[in-house]
């Protein structure tokens, strides 16, 4: 079992370094563990939560972030992970989001690769979790970063309004703005080359 957790943690570490899927504070995980009920999608068969045909990210190239979310209790720090990755695991593991895939808008790719601090308005990237039917988005409007959680069936927001909940965009924003500006510009995955 320890070997399985190690393999999962290493796979997640590699993927999260590349894309940085909304690593969130440990406080949000604690809040979610205290009976948070808002907007947590129920696990469903993949066929029931597959992205709707014609989803806006369908033609975007896949990002490098791809893999399973480790189980709660996996410590990624001794495996070479960082505080951002550990916060991500601690926040989302209770949701049991399953495997994930990332996509970056090709119009943003050059800026993403340069670790830009500002992006043009538009849809920037998405981290897709088919098992829970959710996508975590990073978009830009009026020169500001806009985080959301959308349903894969219809691309409509399923974000929680509950403060500290893992599916509350404010939780994403708090983490992405922290960690000594490692996620400056809105994305965390481009922080290391």
Image: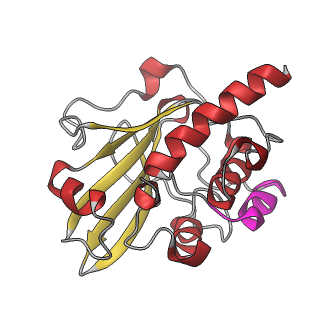
Query: How many marks are shown on the rendered structure?
Result: 0
Q: What residue sits 44% from the left and 28% below the top?
A: 49
**In this rendering, position of residue 192 left or right of residue 165:** left
Q: Is residue 169 above or below residue 193?
A: below
Chosen colour scheme: secondary structure
Q: What residue sits 73% from the left and 45% below the top?
A: 76
Name the one closer to the observer, 81 or 4. 81
Q: Is residue 79 above or below residue 25?
A: above
Q: Quadrant for residue 87, please give it.
A: bottom right
Q: Quadrant for residue 50, please give it.
A: top left
Q: Quadrant for residue 147, please give it.
A: bottom left
Name the one closer to the observer, 5 or 59. 5
Q: Please check the rendered image and state whether residue 31 is part of the magenta-colored stretch, yes or no.
A: yes
Name the one closer to the observer, 169 or 174. 174
Name the one closer to the observer, 169 or 25. 25
Q: Is residue 129 above or below residue 26?
A: above
**In this rendering, position of residue 71 left or right of residue 138:** right
Pinpoint residue 137: horizontal percent, then vertical percent. Answer: 39, 55
Q: What residue sits 59% from the left and 37% below the top?
A: 12
Pinpoint residue 2: horizontal percent, then vertical percent. Answer: 84, 24
**Image quadrant where one finds the N terminus:** top right
Q: What residue sits 21% from the left and 40% below the top?
A: 60
Pinpoint residue 56: horizontal percent, then vertical percent. Answer: 21, 44
**In this rendering, position of residue 77 left or right of residue 149:** right
Q: Please check the rendered image and state whether residue 138 is part of the magenta-colored stretch, yes or no.
A: no
Q: Which residues are drawn in magenta?
A: 24-35
């Amino acid at each position: 079992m320890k070997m399985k957790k190690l393999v999962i943690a290493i796979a997640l570490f590699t993927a999260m370094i590349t894309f940085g899927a909304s690593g969130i504070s440990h406080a949000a995980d604690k809040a979610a563990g205290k009976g948070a009920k808002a907007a947590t999608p129920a696990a469903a068969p993949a066929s029931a939560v597959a992205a709707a045909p014609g989803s806006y990210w369908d033609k975007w190239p896949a990002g490098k972030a791809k893999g399973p979310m480790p189980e709660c209790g996996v410590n990624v720090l001794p495996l070479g992970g960082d505080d951002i990755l550990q916060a991500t695991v601690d926040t989302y593991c209770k949701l049991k989001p399953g495997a994930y895939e990332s996509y970056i808008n090709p119009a943003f790719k050059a800026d993403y690769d340069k670790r830009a601090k500002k992006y043009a308005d538009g849809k920037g990237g998405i981290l897709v979790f088919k098992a829970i039917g959710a996508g975590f988005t990073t978009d830009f409007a009026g020169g500001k970063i806009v985080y959301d959680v959308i349903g894969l069936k219809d691309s409509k927001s399923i974000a929680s309004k509950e403060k500290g909940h893992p599916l509350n965009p404010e939780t994403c924003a708090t983490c992405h703005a922290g960690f000594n500006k490692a996620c400056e510009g809105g994305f965390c995955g481009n922080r290391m080359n």
